[in-house]
Amino acid sequence: MEFMFAPPPYLYVLKILLIHLNESDLVACGIHKSNIQHFVREIFATQYDSIEANSRLYFAYEFPIVFAELIKSDNEYDLNEILADEKYLKVIMDSIARCDVFWDILVDIQERYYASSKEAFYRFPIVQSSIIERITSEVIWDVQEDILSKITSEIEDNYDELEEYEDVYEMTNFVLQGIVDDIHDQITEIMNAKLDKRGINSITAEDFDIDTILSEDIDIHDMIERKYYEMMYSQSDEYKQQLQEPIENIVELFEDTYWLS
């Protein structure tokens, strides 16, 4: 019985064929690109469930590398039968959504397999959901520090009032209400800038659920709570004592000069 988390054999074979062997190696082995194309088509036709699970969950960092090698523009593989099938396209798009080469693969797919229908390609629900997921992950990375800075400033400005709250959620919600509009505007601006940069007109910032991004992906209430208690602790006598003790020890060390003699 195959161990459930062992790489599927076809992934191992594809990595050797596409990554570890160069074209001259393949020729020496009697392997042609048409053979690899046929192998890939057979995998999608017979191992679809495995590819769907493994590319998204168990080996999510390895499949995008393989897909990138198959699809990139300087290769000559004809994968039209796969990429024209929305079911198979979805597997690939889901797999590459968070990988470094996402935009390169997306452009290669569009230019090679949907050259005459660019607008229609970017309106595919499959493609749009992958773009939204990708931009969401980029935005989260981009705004984390700015959000933390806004949280810190808001807590500092309202510290005395926040101390009166007994319910943590009410306290974090009070802080959030003071900064949420600015954060919404900032995220919207970043999203539109990213879409403009990629020339994508079929999606706007309105297609993103910014409230869900803040509450679930960023978990802003948790960020506020952690920052508040961190700041509260930094104002406590216990914390100040911890800072003071090393200073006092150093002073005592220099006052007690017997160790110099």
Image (cartoon, rainbow, N blue to C red):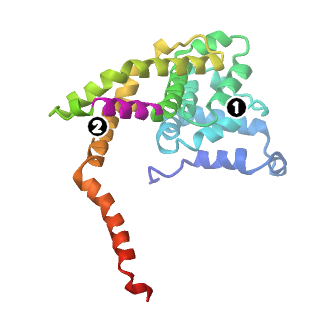
Q: Main secondary structure of the magenta part?
A: helix
The residue beneath circle 2 is 225
Q: Position of residue 114 (x, y in %)?
A: 69, 16
- Image-based side of 22 in relation to 81, left or right: right
What amino acid type should be assigned to the residue bearing mark 1? Ile
The kind of secondary structure element at disc 1 is: helix
Q: Position of residue 98 (x, y in %)?
A: 54, 34
- Residue drawn at (61%, 37%), measured in percent from left and top? 100
Observer-side mark, 1 or 2, equals: 2
- Placement of 175 over or under 123, stated as above or below: below
Badge 1 vs badge 2, beta-carbon distance below 8 Å? no
- Image-based side of 8 in relation to 75, left or right: left
- Residue drawn at (31%, 33%), measured in percent from left and top? 155
In which quadrant of the rendered view does residue 87 lie? Answer: top right
Q: Residues within 10 Å of mark 2 (few under 14, many from 20)?
A: some
37 or 235: which is nearer to us? 235
- Image-based side of 84 in relation to 257, left or right: right
Answer whether residue 209 is visible to the viewer in this image: no
- Image-based side of 128 in relation to 77, left or right: left
What amino acid type should be assigned to the residue bearing mark 2? Glu
- Residue drawn at (68%, 20%), measured in percent from left and top? 110
18 or 161: which is nearer to us? 161
The residue beneath circle 1 is 71
| Figure quadrant of the N terminus | bottom left
Say whether disc 1 or disc 2 marks the residue closer to the N-terminus: 1
In which quadrant of the rendered view does residue 225 lie? Answer: top left
167 or 98: which is nearer to us? 167
- Residue positioned most to the bottom: 261
Which region is colored magenta? 146-158
Answer whether residue 188 is visible to the viewer in this image: yes
The kind of secondary structure element at disc 2 is: helix
79 or 182: which is nearer to us? 182
